[in-house]
Amino acid sequence: MSNLNVPQLAAFPRLAFVDLETTGGTLASDRITEVGIVEVDEQGVREWSSLVNPQMPIPPFVQSLTGISNDMVRDAPTFEELADVIHARLEGRIFIAHNARFDHGFLKQAFGQTGHSFRPSVLCTVRLSRKLYPEHARHNLDSLVARHRLEVAQRHRALGDAQLIWQFWQRIHEEHEADAIAEVVAKLTKRPSLPPKLDAAVLERLPRSHGVYLFYGANEWPLYVGKANNLRRRVMSHFSGDHASERELNLCQQTERIEWVETAGELGALLQEARLVKQCMPAANRQLRQSEELFSWRLLSRAGRLQAVLARGDDLFFAHDPQLYGLFTSSRAATQALQGLAEAHQLCPLLLGLEKSKGRACFASQVGKCSGACAGREDRDAHDARVLEALKAMHVQPWPYPGAIGLREGEATHVIDAWSYVGTALDEAQLAGLLARGQQPFDRDVYQILQKWLPKLGPRLRLLQA
């Protein structure tokens, strides 16, 4: 497997197969102890490696795994001394590594400390193996060695493992068509297409945590607010180039600035998104934008019979009324929904209050679309029971607690009162400040979010205020 297969390089003419050894797996506190690079291009294959003085002790477990001891790196050059050489060997090449996020992350941080810009196209051979060999469950380097009969020189040393990755690259070209490999590699290495006025450095600072992000254009008001379980991945997906609509494409082209708010988890992100959309009214957020009005059907007993009366959000306290059915942003939508239920269940539109009484049975009864409670063909009590059954799925649950509650998520407490999101507290002082704000208006979006979340929160819920 040592001969260079030049046709492999037609689509990817400059490659660097890279492996690092480090003092551990924590990017914030560990350091590089060895770098191994196999450079491949039309001039051939060149190998380079060097031990690196991490300027910190190597833990005994890592020494045992890699064979790299503190004595071996004591007189080795530091990364700062090697930075120019390593950068020159990697510049302009596809950066190929196994679990590439690890190796790329350590190098990027180290280069950042030496003032070098480092933004290569990155290809992870774990992901490449999964794409090309989906029938296999394991894709770690040892599995690739066994499956593809790779020749091991020095396992867990930087150059030895880089050589294995280069061998794997050659092996896949023996087992797959070049065009198929090129298609997969193109997808895995696809770089985001950034708007011209957006600072690319901002994307590098995006965390991989839950949160809410805001896209800004030329003025101070956001164009779009979104939530994410992984802020970095979600924001980057907007610039992937695979825009589902012209609206998405225009949004990306107009974005000049990005801000974000990290949250303790998914629930916090959902609540923050709903709040920010209402506060900022971004044009691209249509579903969560604040409606000027809110409507619901209130079931009232009139002359001993149930009748639906359209209620507006400013006419009643939505959070506590037990007779509300459905939440709608217009009277038209509310009427259409009730008419649809009446037709589906053969309910009487006259008795429901959808038609005015003219002293005779409703028109639906005359054409067989009403069971005839208005004409005496169905018992009125039976009709009322069918009305309740038909509307059951639309019932608006009244606030089930005597006051505000706290929902624990990580180190944060989300304060909810009467289906409104008051805010999130990280300590008791913040919690007291939120409770002092008093009750907020009923929020349809918070109601819908909590209908899904309250049943699974269990012990993370506590009553804060009665």
Image (cartoon, grey):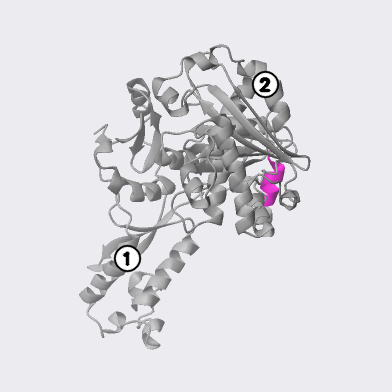
Q: Which of 89/460 is in front?
A: 89
Where residue 462 appears, as percent x and y from the top left, is 25, 35
Q: Identify the image quadrant of residue 254.
A: top right
Residue identified by numbered label 1: 391
Relative to residue 49, is residue 455 depicted above or below? below
Q: Measure the alpha-carbon separation of dots 2 and 1.
A: 69 Å
Observer able to see residue 332: yes
Q: Secondary structure at mark 1?
A: helix
Give the residue at x 39% y 48%: 449
Q: Amino acid at mark 1?
A: Leu
Mark in the foreground, 2 or 1: 2
| Segment colored magenta | 249-255
- 154 vs 95, left or right, is left
Residue, far right:
43
Residue 77 shown in magenta: no
Question: Which of these two is toward me, 460 or 376?
Answer: 460
In the rendered structure, does residue 253 fall within the stretch colored magenta? yes
Q: Is residue 267 above or below residue 202?
A: below
- Quadrant of the image containing the C terminus: top left
Task: Give the quarter of the image for residue 18.
Answer: top right
**Can you tell which mark lies on residue 271?**
none
**Neighbour tally class for label 2: few under 14, some 14-19, many 20 plus, Cα within 10 Å:** some
Q: Main secondary structure of the magenta part?
A: helix
Above-or-below relation of 234 to 377: above
> Which badge, 2 or 1, comes first in the chain's sequence?
2
Looking at the image, which residue is at 59% across and 36% down?
162
Q: Secondary structure at mark 2?
A: helix
Q: Residues within 10 Å of mark 1 (few under 14, many from 20)?
A: some
Label ID, residue 83:
2
